[in-house]
Amino acid sequence: MPGVDPTQKTRLLVVGNGMAGARTVEEILKRGADRFDVTMIGDEPYGNYNRIMLSHVLAGETAVDDADLLLNPMSWYRENGVTLYAGDRAVSLDRFAKSVRCESGRDVPYDVLVIATGSNTFFPNMDGLREADGRLARGVFGFRTIEDTNGMLQMAASGDDLRAVVIGGGLLGLEAAYGLRTQGLEVDVVHSPGHLMNQQLDERGGRLLRNKIESLGVGVHTSKRTTAVLRTDAGRVSGVAFADGTSLPADMIVVTAGIRPNVEFGRGGGLVVERGIVVDDQLRCEDEGSIYAVGECCQHRGEVYGLVAPLWEQAVVLAEHLTGSNSAAAYHGSRSTTKLKVAGVDVAAMGVKGPEREDDEFVQFYEPRSGTYKSVVVRDGKLIGATLLGDISKANFLTQAFDEKVPLPDERIGMLFDMGTPTAATGAAELADDVQVCNCNGVTKGAIVACVHAGAKTMGDVTAATRAGKGCGSCKGLVADIVACAAGGAVESDPSADWYVPCIPLAKPALIDAIRERDLRSVSQVFAELATGGREDASSKMPLASLLRVVWGPDWVDEPGALFINDRVHANIQRDGTFSVVPQMKGGVTTPDQLRRIADVADKYQVPLVKVTGGQRIDLLGIKKEDLPKVWGDLDMPSGFAYGKSMRTVKTCVGSDFCRFGLGDSTALGIALEDRFQGLETPAKLKLAVAGCPRNCSEALCKDLGVVSVGDDKWEIYVGGAAGAHIRKGDLLATVVGSDEVVRVAGVFVQHYRESAQWLERTYAWVPRVGLDVLQRRLIDDVDGIVAGLEERLQVSVDGYRDPWQERSAPKSNAQFTPSLPLLPLPQVPVR
């Protein structure tokens, strides 16, 4: 490449750590990992994630830390030698010095620069949308980032009877409406054009989609232009006003009125910018020799693209050009084909929506009762447009026809139904290898077939290797068909899907039986006796250690290396290598003496941050590893277990002693529950709460186990709730009389969860998987006769409880509390 010394590694700088930037780096590393010293700058404090999956997070179907969302976790960058400055923002470009200045003040030099800054949410001019300093008003959100999504989820969990208005009835707006509706909000969608998804659908398709959306309980208002966000005197959102003088009430407003290429970095650096940063067929910026742009921020031949498929195509071309692996690599633009799921409705669209000339052939099928709409547009014997809604079984054939890879049937109706054209199953076999099967992750049929021929036999194998099906999920059926065709038969079931750990071919109940029968009490014993070939597996150590503690209580054998750092030192490691200490405060109740001790410790050890937690306790952050035993000694308080996979805390409200509305003594019951379950090992963290009345001030309805007083010493027990990255209202397991019965039923539930849930499976996933009715029959009605055994085994664990902070006087090893700092400095998140 011009200007680059071939004898040295090329300093490649990528500004933007989104889907386009990270995919470009992946493609470059495949072709020339040893030629580049790669640095990336991302203004979000995460690795690369799949923005398409944010709608699943909002709908409660996926957690923020789910592997389907995180495409490249932080470990990926380390493993591939990529320097990532996360949580920083590139603010200025010096083309002549070949350097980029970051918001943190960091200057990053480069030989080759790739700009992948993506797009920003477009916020139309509306009165009341922003505060005086330019920030969005409280209660107003875009829908573009994890931060946006978390903000909506937190607000959705903050109260009942909330109303949301989504401005924009395109794909993103309908996904936002669907997600918020699943969170229990009343939702209205406002769209200024005359029908929904007008970019992809014609009026009839939009009308049918409207029926589907309204059947979900979402209000739809088309031909409405929003002119103002209405706010209270205190500044909170109260509704939206329209150009026709009408209005809608709202507590939350989500703006999904489109996106705009994020070009400010390029424009500030003097690059040619029109709608996007102008690039040529090699994605090179105009009049530049070493600066490129890729993804939604770039403009190629007058076009900008907001779909992921063109991003993947651009990434391959740019990687082939930069590495020299294909000297003829060129990007010629992308044809718009979309296959996705909108609020649970399958949609496929390509090309034009309807006839544009008098001689265009137009075939249309419309059946509102079944929710099916199909149309094709043919010009001069070529398919130039197709729309499918509801039934998209012909999408694969139409995609090939649109790309002119298969001839059209003489009877055009055959393109919409199985009348001589390939069926869905036959179509999988006949698809060309270069057809893109998974639009979300840019996976072709050829890549899936190659994966199968390389040894993959199951859907899980293929998905893990290629990411096919990890986006919206609409392609999973086709992926399975392709795997079956490539494997010469039906897709093999993946037996390991039910194994508790990857290296032992046993489901959890069978594994527990084997551990008990063979009296295996250490992780190394389990590996030697039960693992395939007796081989140890690092990822299996923590789940096995947890399981051994469930089975044997204090009588398990703790070995060096079997536990994660948090469990080894009984504190929560922080990003800078220090630790957080949270002493126990049962039910959130403390004393002046405890508060004085906490304050003295904070002063003595120069604790940089003292914070009240969401679980009604006090967190001391920034404790050095070697100081932990001394801090515990000076506090002289029990461990609060704010680390590891265990019962964490029981949050309580004031209860009946002081509260005017209290129906039951929630504080005393919360303390009793915490006494009972303190330190109890569980498959994932467990959070509890007790509310003294249905006003639910302690948020008991969204905990792993929540208890609500309903008067007359009656208590409702809710299970499987969540209010973190995943939001879910708990299911009512039982209504019982007396606090003693609450503790007993809660114990039976917790022990059953301990013994049957998968490792890291939270109750909000486990309860729906097992089924509420099954849990009620097993644990309340005792139809299987297991309750007595559960109570007995729980009692063994409770009796064996020891406060781990007592290890301060007798460390388990010489290295347990040896200094671990200094570590490598981590990137500092700029204060904004």
Image (tube, grey):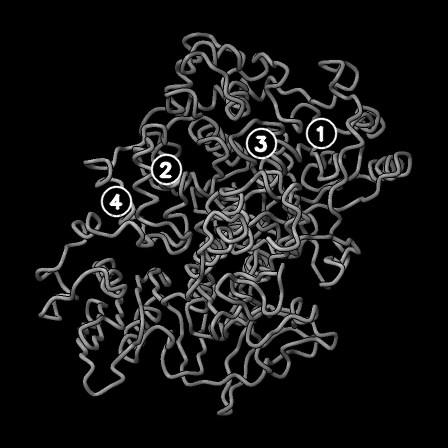
What is the CA distance from the residue labelled 3 to the residue labelled 2? 21 Å
* SS type, badge 2: helix
**Nearer-the-camera pick, 764 or 78:** 78
Asked if labels 4 and 3 touch by Cβ distance under 8 angstroms, the answer is no
**Nearer-the-camera pick, 645 or 738:** 645
Labels 1, 4: front one: 4
> Which disc number belongs to residue 645?
3
Name the spot of residue 593 as percent of width and height, x first: 85, 36
* SS type, badge 1: loop
Is residue 341 visible in this depiction of the protein?
yes
Q: Is residue 138 above or below residue 344?
A: below
Is residue 165 visible in this depiction of the protein?
no
What is the CA distance from the residue labelled 3 to the residue labelled 4? 39 Å
> Which disc number belongs to residue 639?
1
What is the CA distance from the residue labelled 1 to the residue labelled 3? 14 Å
**Nearer-the-camera pick, 158 or 485:** 485
